[in-house]
Amino acid sequence: MAYMRLGDLLIAAGAITQEQLEEALTIQKQKKERLGDVLIESNIITERQLIEALQMQLGVDFIDLTAISIPLELAKFVPRAIAKKYNVVPVKLVKDELFVAMSDPLNFVAQEEIKAASHKRVVPMISTRRATEQAIGTLYGSEGTARAIEEMKREVGTSTPDIVPVQMNQTDAGNASAAPTIRFVNSVIERAFLERASDIHLEPQEGEMVVRMRIDGILRKILTVPANLQSNVISRLKIMGGMNISERKIPQDGRAMVQVRHHEIDLRISSMPTIYGEKIVLRLLDKSGHTITKQSIGLEGADLQKYDALLKNSSGVILIVGPTGSGKSTTMCAMLQELANEETNLMTLEDPVEYNIPGVNQCQINEKTGMTFAAGLRAILRQDPDVISVGEIRDGETGAIAIRAAITGHLVLSTLHTNDAVSAIDRLVDIGVEPYLISSALRGVISQRLVRKVCPHCKKAYRPEAEELAMLGLPENANVQFYRGEGCHECYHTGYKGRRAVFEIFMLNGRIRRMVTEGAKYDALLRAAVETNFVTMRENCRNLVLRGEISAAEAARHQFHSGLTFC
């Protein structure tokens, strides 16, 4: 096939017209940009259409960087400065050929510089700009980790070690004399902190151990560790957590405190035996963060007024509900901080204690010793409490005791796993709490989810499609703008940075209490709530989309209940 110019290829493929090409060429001369970039910025073609045209024009292969794991050792062939300058990333080495993913495979200057730096023959491959930028961040963000892995390999050699307990300062990240295993663990924790990860997963698999981090609620694969180094890493983490390093067949829990960039990080370490070895999960809690307040967790408007009204109660039950990882513990902490004062005896039962709150008597659940939620709650009632916080109502016994404590003049705060606020009633009935007790004691239910915020640094407005409008319950002709993140170095090219909570607060009035006592089900209770000033999570989420705080795609990712869903 004869060589064809990019514009001609796009016309032949029906992607653009001659008029659009001429207009783009005029803009290209003015801006001194690549034709492909001009066409994409003008919303004439998509990035995928450009890639397909370049494949035909140049005969290069496309590579999906999101579907592969790039070996860390490849970073030494392409210096970080070159990778960032030209938006290129090495993907594999076959004999003397270095395969390089490029968003611009026509950049021959970049190819020559890579050839000079690597002393290899460069084979270009085409990839999307965002995927390439993200791969660069992942690969070169792990350089310190890669060096530690290489040192670990040299120490271990080709053997598979048993247990190598390393008794050194767990925060000694910069000490060149520190054991490589320690430096590796420290570098992983530091990276997790810098990328705002809430959890680190170390997952043994056949032939390797995969390290993933949960960032803004989404798990991302960061790197892999050779299988023969797995035992060292797991042992180090278990030593840090005060766990039994010789016990590998039962789950264990541990805790450690480390310092990262002058921040105190509380690590909750959990081990679980798998067929390929122990999986380790680390939960990171920044102890030197800001004080948690009702404003900082995202409460505003009518929901903030309802929240304030609930905390004015001197007795009754207030429930915080949502799935795992929805921020219930953080909201509970904000409530406890607001209620704590010298005149109030505030006691908590937690499993585990996540936040240390001044002025609050916090008790740790330990089921091995018989300190369950139910047993602890009975004991707390003999401690003259004013406010009681129960980490979670897990069974009918705990629920019944909490309800009865509320009826006898105590304010009880607790959490429950339900999809939305109204379904908390059915959940309490399901675990064995009598409806008349629920109607007497329950003051309100706060339901919440965490949603990713659009990155403010690469935020861009656009006109939504009819499908997006319909998803949010907006008319097809609605004159609105939505926002999404284009991806930048601030958000690691995801388009999202940080999370916030979306709430719905269900307040019980006289009519709803009578309905609960009479055994009314979810649908009837929801209709009654909507007839009051109940604002569903779906409505609050829609408002956030219209304000540009979250994207329509993020709204679609969450299945919001309260009788209505986005999908």
Image: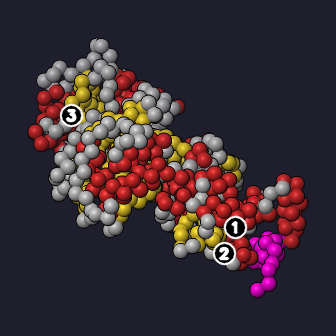
Q: Amino acid at mark 3?
A: Gln
Q: Which secondary structure, mark 1?
A: loop
- Which residue is situated farthest in the left direction here? 369
Image point (46%, 34%), residue name: 261
Residue 364's disc number:
3
Q: Is residue 343 magenta?
A: no
Residue at disc 2, secondary structure: loop
- Rate crowding at label 3 as few (under 14), some (14 to 19) or many (20 or more) other CA atoms within 10 Å: some
Q: Which mark is residue 105?
A: 1
Residue pictured at 45% horizontal, 52% vertical: 147
Residue 468: x and y in percent read: 60, 57
Asked if labels 2 and 1 touch by Cβ distance under 8 angstroms, the answer is yes
User: Which class describes the residues within 10 Å of circle 1: few (<14), some (14-19), or many (20+)?
Assistant: many
Q: Position of residue 384 (x, y in %)?
A: 17, 20
In the rendered image, which residue does mark 2 sit on? 60
Give the label, 1 or 3, closer to the camera: 1
Give me the residue at 24% from left, 28% from top.
Answer: 362
Which of the 4 image quadrants contains residue 470?
bottom right
Res 455 → quadrant: top right
The residue segment tinted magenta is: 1-17
Q: Alpha carbon of mark 2 to alpha carbon of mark 3: how far?
A: 60 Å
| Residue 272 vs residue 361, the one in the foreground | 272
Q: Is residue 51 left or right of residue 369?
A: right
Q: Nearer the viewer, residue 405 or 458?
A: 458
Residue type of the residue flagged with mark 1: Pro
Percent x, y for residue 153? 36, 58
Is residue 3 visible in this depiction of the protein? yes
Q: Secondary structure at mark 3?
A: strand
